[in-house]
Image: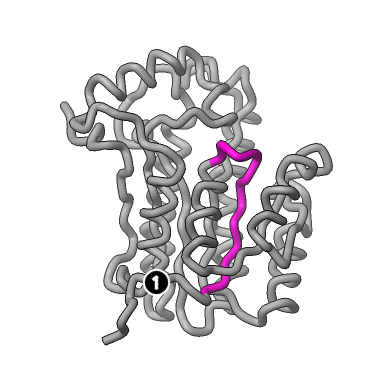
Amino acid sequence: MKALCNSVAGKKGLIVGIANENSIAYGCARVLREQGAELAITYLNEKAEKYVRPLAEGLDSPLILPLDVEQPGEIDAVFKAIEAQWGKLDFVIHSIAFCPMDDLHGRVTDCSEHGFLQAMRVSCYSFIEMARHAEPLMKDGGALITMSYHGADKVVENYNIMGPVKAALQSVTRYLAHDLGGKGIRVHAVSPGPLKTRAASGIAHFDALIDQAIERAPQNRLVDIEDVGMTTAFLISDAARALTGETLYVDAGFNIMA
């Protein structure tokens, strides 16, 4: 038995979705780096780079790369750079989502075709693409982690079309786990409670959602990005080797409440 079976020391992984120091992806990256993992980090575009690059440099990342999943060839370029740098990959954290504001703020009934397809493309299909590119690099197995939310399971006021999109993402997680399990690649969705991130600020009446979470969660608190990072590190570690296809809630128990 390994002395530190829950260690991620020496593992090499890709982190997608850091926008600033409040991002869930950054919380994951910080915890993983503190535990000895080596990280490749992406930024959305030139505008985002000035915020992300200093964070990535602070994490000693040898690869800091642009990645807009809607731009042809950019996912492929990231994984080619990883192959050239490391020749292998142990984990991917996929923490990106997008929906046009008009569609996010409107009823599901009124969602435009364009808005729905773009939300699915960025938030869900990109995870499939990353899994496909990661598979040949995960020669010794690995872990693929994406981020969901309680609105995938229950109707959450003002979450709107992102609920069905995240439900699709959770289903994709299970099917990827089935596809890749024979190669030792484990796939999970992590479902944090509401967090004060830039992405969450686009949800209408988000402050009310925060207040409700604190009031109704058994622990009577919000989770933070470090809580999510610690859970993610466990899932990536060998201690979680028998787990795959799960959606794990990091929400102070909010999801168990009726």
Q: Residue at x 36, y 58 (%)?
A: 174
Q: Nearer the viewer, residue 43 or 244?
A: 43
Vertical arrangement, residue 44 with respect to residue 155, above or below: below
Q: Nearer the viewer, residue 132 or 252?
A: 252
In the image, 31: left or right of 218? Answer: right
* Residue 65: quarter of image: bottom right
User: Is the stretch drawn in magenta largely helix, strand or loop?
Assistant: loop
Residue 149: x, y in percent?
Answer: 39, 37
Vertical arrangement, residue 123 with respect to residue 84, above or below: above
Residue 43: x, y in percent?
Answer: 72, 48
Residue 147: x, y in percent?
Answer: 46, 46
* Residue 214: quarter of image: top left
In the image, 112: left or right of 223? Answer: right
Residue 143: x, y in percent?
Answer: 45, 67
Q: Which residue is mark 1?
A: 7
Does dot 1 land on a helix, a strand or a loop? Answer: loop
Q: Residue at x 47, y 52 (%)?
A: 146
Vertical arrangement, residue 174 with respect to residue 167, above or below: below
* Quadrant of the snapshot with the C terminus: top left
Q: Residue at x 55, y 23 (%)?
A: 201
Q: Residue at x 53, y 15 (%)?
A: 106
* Quadrant of the snapshot with the N terminus: bottom left
Residue extending furthest toward the right: 46
Magenta region, residue range: 11-23
How many marks do you count on the picture?
1
Q: Nearer the viewer, residue 145 or 62?
A: 62
Vertical arrangement, residue 1 with respect to residue 21, above or below: below
* Residue 86: quarter of image: bottom right
**Residue 196 colored magenta?**
no
Name which residue type carries label 1. Ser
